[in-house]
Image: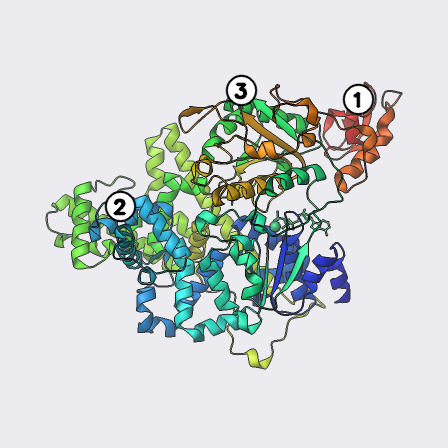
Amino acid sequence: ALNAENELLKDLNEPQKEAVLHGDGPLLVLSGAGSGKTRVITRRVAHLVQVRGVYPWRILAVTFTNKAAREMRERLVQLLGPQAHELVVSTFHSSSSMILRRVLRDPTVGADKSLEAVTGGLTPSFVIYDDGDQLQLVKRAMREVRVDPIMQPREILHRIDQEKNAARLPDDMVVDSEDLRGMVVQKTYRAYQRLLRAANAVDFGDLLLLLVALFRKRSDVLEQYRRRFQHILVDEFQDTNPVQYELLRLLAPPERRPNLVVVGDDDQSIYRWRGASVDNILGFPEEYVGARVVKLEQNYRSDQTILDAAHAVIARNTRRMPKKLWSDRPKGEHLQLLMNRDERAEAQDVARRIHELQREGFIKYSGMAVFYRTNAQSRVLEEALRLARVPYTLVSGRSFYDRAEVRDAAAYLRLMVNPRSDADLLRIINTPARGIGDTTVERLVDWAQQAGVSLYEATAAPERIPGLNTAAVRRLTGFHAVVSSLHAFAQESKDAASAVDQMLKESHLVESLVTEGSDESLSRAENLREFLGAAQEFDLNRAAAAVAAASLGDEEGEEVPERPPEEESLDDSPLTADVPPLNAFLEQISLVGEADAEVGEGRVALMTLHAAKGLEFDAVFITGMEDGVFPHSRALASEDPDGEEMAEERRLCYVGFTRARKRLFISLAQCRSLFGELRYNPPSRFLREVPQSLFGFAEQELETPVPKSAPMVARKRNWADEDDGPRVDRSYSQTSDMDGVGGDVRGMRVRHEQFGMGRIVSADGNGPNAKVTVEFGGGVGLKRVIARFLMPG
Ligand code: ATP
Ligand code: MG
């Protein structure tokens, strides 16, 4: 164990060690970007298991995105081996969803009438509705309760989400009798919840809200989970909203001095619009009295110049925890400013720079990212990258699952496990076309509503529905047969892929697209095959995890944790143990969120600034640095332009800057069409707050804060003032051996970070910037590279 401990601690600094070794009781790690907070969480989990002997299933680690959870799991598998699969490492939503299903499977919960108001007949196979489904449901709810049409469905939905984020069910809303809009929201919210329950469905907000409500009513059930999760660790704590915090408080009540470790950075709180509040992190020491507070001050991610820029921007926020952040990395390159005529020129410029960085052989495509404030900016960037043949991934995980045909397939699957889901049934009742027209559907819906049954049940005997002709009755009967056969299949299926395969066959989804035969429909058919591929991959992963778990303790010398007798009663089977595979697959796809797409190997990542949280890249481009784009026009227009909204934009800027390790490019356009409107925006105030010297401009050279000149040319770093630093700079200083390029270096053996070993064929010019042609081995062949990226081989 001592060895293991040394191994886990060896590359941590003192305060990081303190946090990893912290014994029992609450702990807050509060610090700036890139200071190793996430690393602390990962190491602490490993330490708990490996050194302190905590059972992995007793640990719950919560991250902000599925992508972050996946990365952390991978890391933990490296550190702990197969036992890591028994940890619960996931987002708030997916862990709540697992726990909620499990609680609902508890027979005493099912039988408890007092929970009716909360669960309303929800079963463990509930489906999760997304944004689009939610909006449909709000519209239906508005029709049912016939509220005054003084509000748009979107607005009502937003208000409902806010209530849920604040942990309030309709009855918990306090509405003044003068407040007409509040009353509309409350009425619609109530009907909306009823419709969700009737469909055996929940929305994202419900996952947390219902669990909180259940725990509040059933302290015996809550107690099981309090005992189960002996250690809870939360990353990005600054972005928890009240319902998430409430769940944490229930599982880890302050008065018990629980082992709750939260890490975060108040300066990176960027989800206020989703109800998150910085007060959670700032108030933690008061809520959890006696909590230990650890501050990390050394940044390991970014060169000093980048940190200076980030600091210059964030320092203007008034309400923040004072923090020092230093780095012993070198100053690094200057920031680079890209100024262009319009958004197209901007996109081309970015593409060209990306090409250059890659060609210099130093930064790989996968080490680069382009950020933007709003999704709408991505289209032009994508076009330019495609033209320039730069491989990229658009990081908005939903896009695949948002395609119409994929949503159809998902709707079929959800009906398979849960035929009561009316929204899904309505989506596919006539997809592919089966001659079931709108009038038939309307009559079906009316009748079902009067009879108080689900649409699926109503299609069982359509002859009861008035006004339908025999053809309509026959078609509904045929449709019912398809769904009921699929439902039966789902009950039996042992994996997700066979269920998807069966669904694609019986529904004729693929067949109808292939018959249609257009390019468009054929590519849609391909997407459905890809969907089947996703299910296969899911099955494989699940099988691998099961094998890993089963082989635990097989290896010689590996200890199988003995469980003490007093714990016998505790159910600690994996949270997902008896979830049928198809349900688990559906769960996974409904929880895919923005920012979850895999950043492809060897590809530049394109994403919104919000999605960039927690990530890091060698080179970062921030586009659209103009007032009105970033900061967003909303913050400029708000009554108090220096108020909370601007502070949040500023934090977002800080998040963006601090993603960069070595190179930060800041880009703006003189005019831009966005949202179909041509605008001339002044340079962003954030840009103007960055000291000019960080761009390599002498202060007095400039009258205007931002140079009017054309895009700045890359300024090569001065060879003489290299200082030693980690990784990057080591290779720089080693290359100084190559300074003599130009003499007879032909035949010399060299090494290149990306291309490997090779021999110099010829050299062009002198010094570190000489262009050298090298014959590389390993099938790479002849390449022209810059001398300073070569090391003596
Ligand atoms: P953010 O605020 O952006 O979420 P963070 O505080 O979570 O950042 P990490 O992502 O954990 O920071 O770490 C930033 C980088 O620094 C990572 O590449 C990490 O591997 C590295 N790092 C962290 N601690 C150390 C250390 N003690 N020695 C060397 N590298 C470290
Ligand atoms: Mg982090």
CA–CA distance in space, label 2 to label 3? 50 Å
Near-viewer residue (710 or 642): 642
**Residue 429 badge:** 2
**Residue 341 badge:** 3
Q: Is residue 506 above or below residue 620?
A: below
CB of mark 2 near ligand 2 (< 8 Å)? no
Identify the residue at horizontal 74%, vertical 63% (top origin): 5
| Label 2 vs 3, first from the N-terminus | 3
Badge 3: residue crowd in 10 Å (few <14, some 14–19, many ≥20): some
| Label 1 vs 3, first from the N-terminus | 3
Q: Could you tell me the amino acid type at mark 2?
A: Ile
- In the picture, which quadrant includes the N terminus? bottom right
Give the number of the mark in front: 2 or 3: 3
Q: Is residue 447 left or right of residue 271?
A: left
> Of all residues shown, which one is farthest toward the bottom?
565
Q: Is residue 604 above or below residue 500?
A: above
Q: Residues at badges 1 and 2 in contact (C-beta under 8 Å)?
A: no
Q: Could you tell me the amino acid type at mark 1?
A: Ala
Give the number of the mark in front: 1 or 2: 1
- Residue 770 in sight here: yes
CA–CA distance in space, label 1 to label 2? 67 Å
Give the number of the mark in front: 1 or 3: 3
Near-viewer residue (83 or 253): 253
CA–CA distance in space, label 1 to label 3? 33 Å
Identify the residue at horizontal 55%, vertical 73% (top origin): 256
Which residue bears the numbered disc 1? 770
Residue 143 spot, x, y in % from top left: 21, 49
Badge 2: residue crowd in 10 Å (few <14, some 14–19, many ≥20): many
Badge 1: residue crowd in 10 Å (few <14, some 14–19, many ≥20): some
Q: How many marks?
A: 3
Q: Secondary structure at mark 2?
A: loop
Q: Could you tell me the amino acid type at mark 3?
A: Arg
